[in-house]
Image: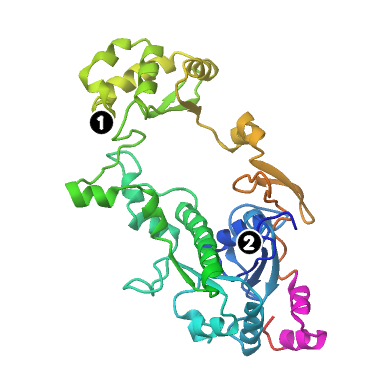
Amino acid sequence: MSRLPLAGLRVLDLATLFAGPLAATLLGDFGAEVVKVEHPTRPDPSRGHGPAKDGVGLWWKVLGRNKRTMTLDLSTPGGRATLLRLAASADVVVENFRPGTLEKWDLGWPELSAANPRLVLARVTAFGQFGPSSHRPGFGTLAEAMSGFAALTGEPDAPPTLPPFGLADSIAGLATAYAVMTALAAREHTGAGQVVDMAIIEPILAVLGPHPTWYDQLGYVQERTGNRSANNAPRNTYRTADGCWVAVSTSAQSVAERVMRLVGRPELIDEPWFATGAGRAAHADVLDAAVGGWIAARTRTDVLAAFEKAEAAIAPVQDVRDVLADPQYTALHTVTTVDDPELGPLRMQNVLFRLSETPGAIRWAGRPHGADTDAVLTELGLAPAEIAALREAGAL
């Protein structure tokens, strides 16, 4: 623990599904002490999302890693008082209740900051803390739709496409962890904490690039192009002779030229339109036919080897089985094995990045609901009789 860069940082994770909890996970991966606070009878729904083994949710094992778990009903007087005591010694609170919920329980920013002026409160909601939609319930799917992501994704003559996983939530989780660290850095200068207002609809818009600027300056609205790009070509997925798929990208002019030489169509390089990415994109049919035809006549192994020799950009289209066997991921230790008391050894994604001197670590996978309640409260200074009284009152 002493080698981890965020050791000594204390985080209360009050959030559920998925952006807020992911932010807390990322902090925990690098040493923060994270306490997951869940309702006594309504735990984080991520425990029940997706496949389970022996009744144990596997998604939770990843999302709940490096977190101690306790139960607390914040709507009760005992729960409110206990949270304020926990917040007094914490650095960060992460929550994703609908705006006004904490305030309804007298646990808003005035009360939390009075208990701990150095506290950072990260509030993660679909639409933010104010505005005409702030009161609405929402999930990442709505952000994927509202941001323009879905409108850009899919084939031109097909419906807008939503991702089959929590894309907007995940991007917001990453952004929230960054926002928390920014607020903590500011605290070093000011001595005071502050509120982070994270709307899930915003980070996904940020990663979509300059679309607002394009529209503002040119009236340009990008349409769906499938796997093609409006900015360069060839850029697509292509099927090999043995029924596999590969992805090719030619964002750099030099790479585009190498690809055309490789597939036996060097004369296309001399076409005036080939000199720019936009020009190549306008002739994507010609380029896709040349590249796709060459790839279709060869096995994936031969295609990958030829592209590598030509120093042209290509990657196999992989499912999770391929990912776990991929030599590059293996070399990076991107997937690691964690020993779990409930399930035994289980594999999951490793910490997000590597630090040369103070690397992060997965110390344990997601723990059972409320497993550490008594231990956390005892460390807080509560006597066994006080813990029993809270439990009797329904606060735990």
Q: CA distance from mark 1 to mark 2?
A: 47 Å
Q: Dot 1 corresponds to which residue?
A: 278
Position of 147 compared to 328: left or right?
Answer: left
Contact between labelled residues 2 and 1, with CB atoms less than 8 Å apart: no
Q: Quadrant of residue 295?
A: top left
Judged left or right of residue 286, residue 294 is: right
Q: Where does the image place residue 209, in percent across and percent down from the top left?
A: 34, 47
Q: Is residue 18 among the parts visible in the rendering?
A: no
Question: Which secondary structure lies at badge 1?
Answer: helix
Secondary structure, mark 2, is: helix
Image: magenta residue range: 372-392
Residue 330 appears in the rendering:
yes
271 sits to left or right of 289:
left
For label 1, the crowd category at 10 Å Cα-Cα, with few meaning under 14, some 14 to 19 and many 20 or more, is some
Residue pointed to by mark 2: 47
Q: Residues within 10 Å of mark 2 (few under 14, many from 20)?
A: many
